[in-house]
């Protein structure tokens, strides 16, 4: 990979936040800061990363809880797929209103993503792949030999589809049809649980 990946696990359901750093320029980005803004910011400072943006794979509370603090402290834009944009500002839609862990309602996104968009930091580029099914606006990010799969694809499993906006049929179709260009060698960084790679998932994941 052309960039390094730091995984920080945070929040009540153990969400993976990924901090990426271009190896040649020190520019980077943050994916899914669900909680522990203090820890994320401390690592960014320690590693000397010039963060250019925050990107969300979808809008559930456990992936967006630290967004506003990072946006304020880092002075960077926040990007999410257009179909999940209202989840940033609505605690019922992002499910935080039902968890008992505190309402998550922040500012609107700065960038609305669409399928096929490119996200760049330093000399690195990730492509947005729309993968609805966990949420309407769920996405994966692919590039540099890595797939950041959010709650679309896990090691040996897939994301839940019983929340509002979820669809098992849509999710399975998205995984089979939208991720078919992802190389077997690509390392998969999911929203929860351990990393895997695409070849292993194609061989062993029952949903593929």
Image: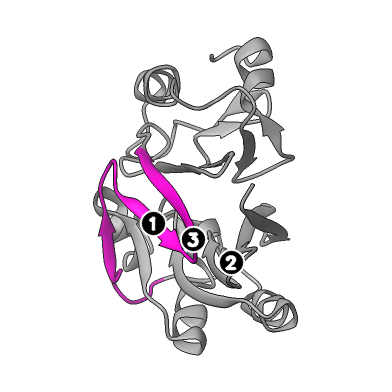
- Are the residues tagged 3 and 1 within 8 Å (C-beta)? no
Whether residue 57 appears in this view of the structure is: no
Q: Secondary structure at mark 2?
A: loop
Q: Secondary structure at mark 1?
A: strand
Mark drawn on residue 93:
none
Mark drawn on residue 123:
3
* Label 3, label 2: how far apart the Cα atoms are: 39 Å
Q: Within 10 Å of the Cα at label 3, are there few (<14), some (14-19), or many (20+) other Cα atoms?
A: some
Q: What range is drawn magenta here? A: 105-129
Q: Residue at x 53, y 75 (%)?
A: 51
Q: Residue at x 44, y 26 (%)?
A: 179
Residue, disc 2 = 101
**Residue 159, position as x, y percentages in the image:** 53, 33
Q: Nearer the viewer, mark 2 or mark 1?
A: 1
Q: Nearer the viewer, mark 3 or mark 1?
A: 3
Q: Does 42 appear in magenta? A: no
Residue 5: image quadrant is: bottom right
Q: Is 17 placed left or right of 53 in the picture?
A: right
* Label 3, label 1: how far apart the Cα atoms are: 11 Å
- Are the residues tagged 3 and 2 within 8 Å (C-beta)? no
**Residue 131, position as x, y percentages in the image:** 38, 34
**Residue 19, position as x, y percentages in the image:** 62, 63
Whether residue 125 appears in this view of the structure is: yes
How many discs mark residues in the rendered view? 3
First along the sequence among labels 2 and 1:
2
Q: Residue at x 34, y 51 (%)?
A: 118
Q: Does 118 appear in magenta? A: yes
């Amino acid at each position: 990979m052309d960039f390094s990946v730091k995984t920080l696990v945070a929040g009540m359901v153990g969400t993976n936040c990924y901090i990426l750093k271009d190896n040649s320029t020190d520019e980077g980005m943050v994916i899914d800061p669900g909680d522990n803004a203090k820890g994320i910011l401390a690592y960014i400072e320690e590693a000397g990363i010039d963060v250019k943006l925050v990107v969300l794979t979808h809008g559930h509370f456990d992936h967006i809880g630290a967004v506003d603090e990072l946006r304020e402290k880092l002075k960077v834009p926040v990007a999410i797929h257009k179909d999940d944009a209202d989840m940033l500002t609505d605690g019922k839609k992002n499910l935080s209103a039902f968890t008992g862990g505190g309402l998550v309602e922040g500012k609107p996104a700065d960038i609305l993503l669409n399928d096929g968009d490119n996200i760049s930091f330093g000399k690195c580029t990730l492509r947005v792949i729309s993968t609805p099914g966990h949420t309407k606006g769920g996405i994966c990010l692919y590039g540099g030999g890595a797939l950041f799969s959010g709650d679309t694809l896990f090691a040996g499993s897939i994301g839940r589809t019983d929340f509002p906006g979820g669809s098992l049929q849509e999710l399975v179709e998205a995984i089979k049809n939208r991720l078919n260009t992802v190389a077997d060698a690509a390392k998969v960084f999911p929203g929860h649980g351990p990393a895997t790679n695409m070849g292993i998932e194609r061989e062993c994941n029952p949903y593929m």
